[in-house]
Image: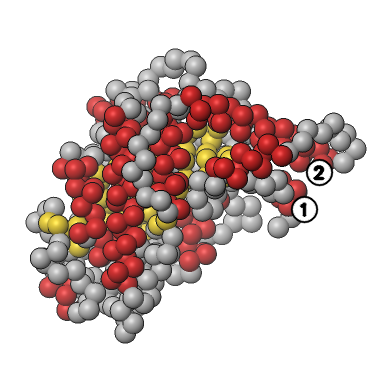
């Protein structure tokens, strides 16, 4: 870590806010951007890699009915490598039970949603979203030359760069224009925001964040030491941002308390309060960890999916009640999938291609891409990727975050 970054991360409760933000509250009216006018050719904040960026992941008519300036993207990182084969089950593939004699989900427990696919039973809270056409599942997602390191693959997903560059920027750097606060990181890392002109706040525990900011004292700007001046300027901006956020949360309509009491539940609850308030932010980042299920997977994975689905269900219902759901798009992803064949420890090892999903009133619900045969594995026993994850980013950046 260089000296400048050390200084910028020294204040309790936040990481870095590199941008100055002229507008933070929903106080102005802005014209809606017609979805039909947004295409990969016309808006290339996030470059596409293949035809996936032209697939109808979003419903153009519903997208056109929303105010582009009010939209919020909620990123949910499933940290550790989610086993998407047990999440979105290829229940017609006979190899599924043959290669996973201990780990397969029994047919009696599965939730069939298409002729070829069933949900893990823990995803039952998301069934209303699926049935309403508000859940899109994208299969076989990955990238060229898959890396099975958690750290390396996470960086690839968060930068959108398969080949590591000397100066890495987050994949959102070109998609956030700086008019409003770029991001709020409520859980996990923030690499996807690196280089974004709008900056971001990393909050974590809200109570600790606000109390930490309250203890920060103003300084007379140091005009001699440039590093100290940067620190002081950022500290001053943090105080301003925190005050506006705290005021917005205080005056926001109440949000249901049915979120789980664990860390992820608190993240989603805070996200709901922020979206319900007048605080302006484009992207909210959440993280649910412990998906690295090399051993004892059945109960662990079921518990994680229960936490994920139940909290996202409450988020959807609350934002529907508050009239904000049409302005929110949730994207859940993981750094890689799991190997098709179970290991000897009631678990699965690192894989490559995986299924990811979106939630929102404006998504084109259903499956995008097809569950491939479990015979289609490479020498490492992993499913072969077919859809580049950066094409999903092209849709998010060029159609949603316009």
Q: How many marks?
A: 2
| In the foreground, 13 or 326 | 13
| 300 to the left or right of 171 | left
Label 1 crowding class (10 Å Cα cut-off): few <14, some 14-19, many 20+?
few
| Earlier-in-chain disc, 2 versus 1 | 1
**Quadrant (top left, top right, bottom left, bottom right) of the C terminus:** top left
User: Hey, which residue is sitting farthest right in the picture?
Assistant: 224
Q: Is residue 197 above or below residue 138?
A: above
Q: Do the residues under discs 2 and 1 have CB atoms within 8 angstroms?
A: yes
Label 2 crowding class (10 Å Cα cut-off): few <14, some 14-19, many 20+?
some
| 28 to the left or right of 54 | right
| In the foreground, 147 or 201 | 201
In the picture of the structure, the residue carrying the numbered disc 1 is 3
Q: CA distance from mark 2 to mark 1?
A: 8 Å
In the picture of the structure, the residue carrying the numbered disc 2 is 227
The residue that appears at 42% across and 64% down in the rendered structure is: 290
| 276 to the left or right of 164 | left
Corner quadrant of residue 148: bottom left
Q: Position of residue 39 (x, y in %)?
A: 35, 33
The residue that appears at 54% across and 48% down in the rendered structure is: 204
Q: Is residue 21 above or below residue 105?
A: above
Q: Position of residue 352 (x, y in %)?
A: 36, 67
Task: Answer yes or no: is residue 42 visible.
Answer: no
Q: Is residue 314 above or below residue 59?
A: below
**Quadrant (top left, top right, bottom left, bottom right) of the N terminus:** bottom right
Corner quadrant of residue 312: top left
| In the foreground, 290 or 262 | 262
The residue that appears at 29% across and 29% down in the rendered structure is: 321
Q: Position of residue 135 (x, y in %)?
A: 24, 44
Q: Position of residue 286 (x, y in %)?
A: 45, 48
Looking at the rendered structure, the secondary structure element under dot 1 is helix
Looking at the rendered structure, the secondary structure element under dot 2 is helix
């Amino acid at each position: 870590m260089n000296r400048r970054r050390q200084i910028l991360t020294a204040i309790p409760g936040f990481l870095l806010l590199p941008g100055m933000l002229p507008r933070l509250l929903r106080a102005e009216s802005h014209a809606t951007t017609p979805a039909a006018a947004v295409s990969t050719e016309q808006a290339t904040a996030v470059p596409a890699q293949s035809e996936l960026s032209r697939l109808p992941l979003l419903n153009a008519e519903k997208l056109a009915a929303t105010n582009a300036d009010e939209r919020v993207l909620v990123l949910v990182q499933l940290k550790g490598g989610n086993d998407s084969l047990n999440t979105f089950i290829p229940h017609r593939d006979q190899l599924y039970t043959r290669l996973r004699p201990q780990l397969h989900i029994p047919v009696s427990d599965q939730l069939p949603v298409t002729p070829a696919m069933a949900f893990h039973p823990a995803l039952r809270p998301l069934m209303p979203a699926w049935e309403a056409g508000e859940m899109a599942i994208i299969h076989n997602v990955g990238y060229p030359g898959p890396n099975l390191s958690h750290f390396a693959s996470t960086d690839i997903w968060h930068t959108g760069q398969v080949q590591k560059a000397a100066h890495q920027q987050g994949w959102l750097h070109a998609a956030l224009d700086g008019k409003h606060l770029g991001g709020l990181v409520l859980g996990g890392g923030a690499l996807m925001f690196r280089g974004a002109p709008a900056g971001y706040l990393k909050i974590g525990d809200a109570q600790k964040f606000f109390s930490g900011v309250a203890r920060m004292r103003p300084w007379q700007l140091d005009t001699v030491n440039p590093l100290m001046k940067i620190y002081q300027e950022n500290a001053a901006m943090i105080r301003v941002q925190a005050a506006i956020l705290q005021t917005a949360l205080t005056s926001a309509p109440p949000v249901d308390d049915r979120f789980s009491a664990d860390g992820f539940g608190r993240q989603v609850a805070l996200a709901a309060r922020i979206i319900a308030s007048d605080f302006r932010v484009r992207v909210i980042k959440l993280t649910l960890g412990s998906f690295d299920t090399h051993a004892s997977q059945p109960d662990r994975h079921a518990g994680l999916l229960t936490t994920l689905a139940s909290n996202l269900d409450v988020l959807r219902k609350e934002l529907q009640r508050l009239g904000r759901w049409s302005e929110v798009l949730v994207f859940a992803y993981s750094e890689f999938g799991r190997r098709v064949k179970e290991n000897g420890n009631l678990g699965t090892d690192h894989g490559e291609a995986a299924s990811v999903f979106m939630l929102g009133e404006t998504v084109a619900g259903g499956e995008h891409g097809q569950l491939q045969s479990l015979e289609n594995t490479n020498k490492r026993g992993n499913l072969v990727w077919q859809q580049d994850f950066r094409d999903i980013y092209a849709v998010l950046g060029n159609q949603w975050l316009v």
